[in-house]
Amino acid sequence: MRAGGNLAIFVDLVVLEGRIVPTGLENLARLAGMQLPAALTVEADARHLLSETVPVHCRADGWNDHEISRELRGGSIIAGMVRPVQRAEGADVAPETIISSSPAAWGETSIADLLRTFTPVKGSEDVPGPIAIAMAAQVRGAAPRGEGVASGRVVIAGTSEILGDEYFAIAARASVANANLAEAIVGWLTARRELVNIPSRPASRAALLVSERDLGQIGLYVILLVPLAAALVGYAVFRSRRSS
């Protein structure tokens, strides 16, 4: 990163004996002006909760005006088990939020109580919302790698679940932007603007399953019945004209 490389981190919670323990990435995050509080994001806004799920799985639509998220505003992503990402105090790098939770969410620090009862109650020691789910920063002093080449760019997201197969599958059915967000992050890190823009809507595809019996019936209609019907119509027209 200091040598000009670019980095995307999708960091998950590590829970040991009822408490959140360091992952080893906290100091690296601070180099990018960010910190990872030992907390789990809880969404309290019912409009952002997924049906039949717990409040640690939610929809997020708090897009910031960043190059990554500018074209994604108006949509939402599905996120779960999110560790809050914050701006580190005293850091000489000023990261920007990409997407955040609703203002009603908070970062629950009493993880043991949450895992035991799963009835979260916001406390004074919890991280106040809205919670940044992902942030981006440009590290100062990173070595340049050439004109037009991005260097020292860092993105940190508080969960890797937004990249999971099941989340992409849900996103495809629910028309949310998990895949677009991942593509936009890669585009920003690699300075490829065409990846940051929202791709055109894919054409709808429908599968048609045809059995051998169906094929036989289709062949009967096409080869026999359709030509026979045309012949009968022609014969009727012929008889009609002859009689007139």
Image (cartoon, rainbow, N blue to C red):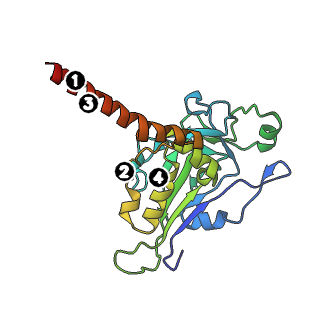
Discs 1/3, front? 1
Q: Which residue is mark 3?
A: 234
Residue 137: where, in percent of width, then height? Answer: 48, 62
Tell me if mark 2 has few (under 14), some (14-19) or many (20+) residues whose alpha carbon lies within 10 angstroms of its own.
few
Residue drawn 28% across and 28% down?
233
Front residue of this view, candidates 65 and 237: 237
Tell me if mark 1 has few (under 14), some (14-19) or many (20+) residues whose alpha carbon lies within 10 angstroms of its own.
few
Mark 2 → mark 3, Cα distance in angstroms: 48 Å
Discs 4/1, front? 1
Tag 2 near tag 3, CB within 8 Å? no
Residue 217: where, in percent of width, then height? Answer: 51, 37
Q: Which residue is mark 2?
A: 200
Q: Which residue is mark 4?
A: 180
Q: Is residue 29 left or right of residue 116?
A: left
Residue 220: where, in percent of width, then height? Answer: 47, 38
Discs 2/3, front? 3
Q: What is the secondary structure assignment of the residue under circle 4?
A: helix
